[in-house]
């Protein structure tokens, strides 16, 4: 199936941002409530209708308990409604993989994406292919479905014609790419790789991974314009809306 020449455009009635750091002052994302509100304003201007709050769960970078995530997400949702912003905020988490994580997952003391058994997982950028593969098998073995956060960050996974990404997807792992890597903001080399990855239909989800209201803001329209040049409309719709809706039970 060719992904090129997809000229027909679908109206995206929803855009779901599956990866964001919008909760105020819990990690290296939004610094305070003002910034959170400004990020939500930007997101609504970009046409984003749902955001999953995915604070870091990582030694040294931040740890927010599931109860706190739930509470803060509710507060952000209420503040958005009060400001008249038409956006839905769902609870989630971005889990940095280490062995201890498996115990926490087994105990059920981790916030899944919107409380589901889908979990957003990141690794050290220098992680090796076998390490990532084994980690994902471990998580799947506990009954969770991992979403690999920003796949473009791991040079080992981009090697050998994305061989490991093929394997991970066969295992059931979902693959997420950051919007800025598709739009070219983080460099032409990465953008080229992402074009290839999309051509092979190896991406399941796009997220902004927004951290601030400035350089790493929740912007997705440039990415969507790029996707519309490269992919069939149905695939664009799946990447920014439908696949996320399915896994979030929305
Ligand atoms: Fe992130």
Image (cartoon, helix red, strand yellow):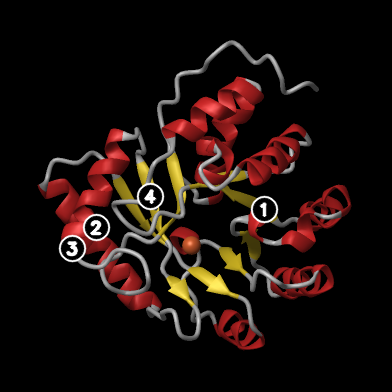
Q: At numbered mark 1, what does the secondary structure look like: helix, strand or loop?
A: strand
* Distance CA(mark 3)–CA(mark 1): 31 Å
* Distance CA(mark 4)–CA(mark 2): 12 Å
Q: Nearer the viewer, residue 105 or 180?
A: 180
Residue at the far left: name it: 82
Q: Which residue is label 3 attached to?
A: 33
Q: Residues within 10 Å of mark 1 (few under 14, many from 20)?
A: many
Name which residue lies at 10% across and 48% down.
82
Name which residue lies at 41% across and 81% down.
63
Write down the quadrant of residue 157 in the picture: bottom right
Front tag of 4 and 2: 2
Left or right relative to 215: residue 98: right
Write down the quadrant of residue 103 in the picture: bottom right
Left or right relative to 72: residue 129: right
Q: Which residue is label 1 attached to?
A: 174
Residue at the far top: name it: 8
Name which residue lies at 32% across and 68% down.
70
CB atoms of marks 4 and 2 within 8 Å: no
* Distance CA(mark 1)–CA(mark 2): 27 Å
Earlier in the chain: of badge 3 and badge 4, it is: 3
Q: Residues within 10 Å of mark 3 (few under 14, many from 20)?
A: some
Q: Residues within 10 Å of mark 4 (few under 14, many from 20)?
A: many
Q: At numbered mark 4, what does the secondary structure look like: helix, strand or loop?
A: strand
Earlier in the chain: of badge 3 and badge 1, it is: 3
Q: Position of residue 37 (x, y in %)?
A: 20, 53
Left or right relative to 125: residue 79: left
Earlier in the chain: of badge 1 and badge 4, it is: 4
Q: Which residue is label 4 attached to?
A: 51
The disc label shown at residue 36, or none: 2
Name which residue lies at 65% across and 25% down.
230
Front tag of 3 and 1: 3
């Amino acid at each position: 199936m060719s992904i090129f020449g997809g000229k027909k455009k679908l109206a995206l009635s929803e855009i779901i941002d599956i990866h964001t750091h919008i909760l105020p002052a819990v990690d290296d994302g939004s610094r305070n409530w003002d910034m959170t509100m400004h990020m939500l304003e930007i997101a609504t201007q970009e046409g984003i209708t749902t955001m999953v709050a995915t604070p870091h769960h990582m030694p040294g970078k931040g740890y927010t308990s599931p109860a706190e995530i739930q509470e803060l997400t509710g507060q952000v949702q209420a503040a958005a409604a009060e400001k008249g912003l038409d956006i839905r905020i769902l609870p989630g988490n971005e889990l940095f993989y280490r062995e201890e994580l498996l115990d926490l997952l087994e105990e059920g003391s981790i916030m899944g994406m919107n409380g589901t058994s889908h979990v957003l997982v990141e690794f050290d950028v220098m992680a090796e292919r076998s390490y990532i593969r084994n980690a994902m098998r471990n998580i799947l073995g506990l009954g969770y479905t991992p979403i690999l956060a920003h796949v473009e960050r791991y040079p080992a996974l981009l090697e050998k014609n994305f061989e490991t990404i093929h394997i991970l997807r066969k295992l059931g792992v979902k693959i997420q790419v950051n919007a800025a890597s598709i739009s070219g903001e983080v460099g032409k080399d990465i953008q080229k790789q992402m074009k290839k990855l999309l051509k092979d239909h190896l991406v399941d989800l796009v997220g902004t991974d927004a951290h601030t209201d400035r350089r790493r803001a929740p912007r997705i329209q440039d990415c969507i314009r790029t996707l519309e040049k490269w992919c069939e409309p149905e695939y664009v719709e799946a990447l920014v809306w439908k696949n996320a809706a399915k896994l979030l039970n929305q």
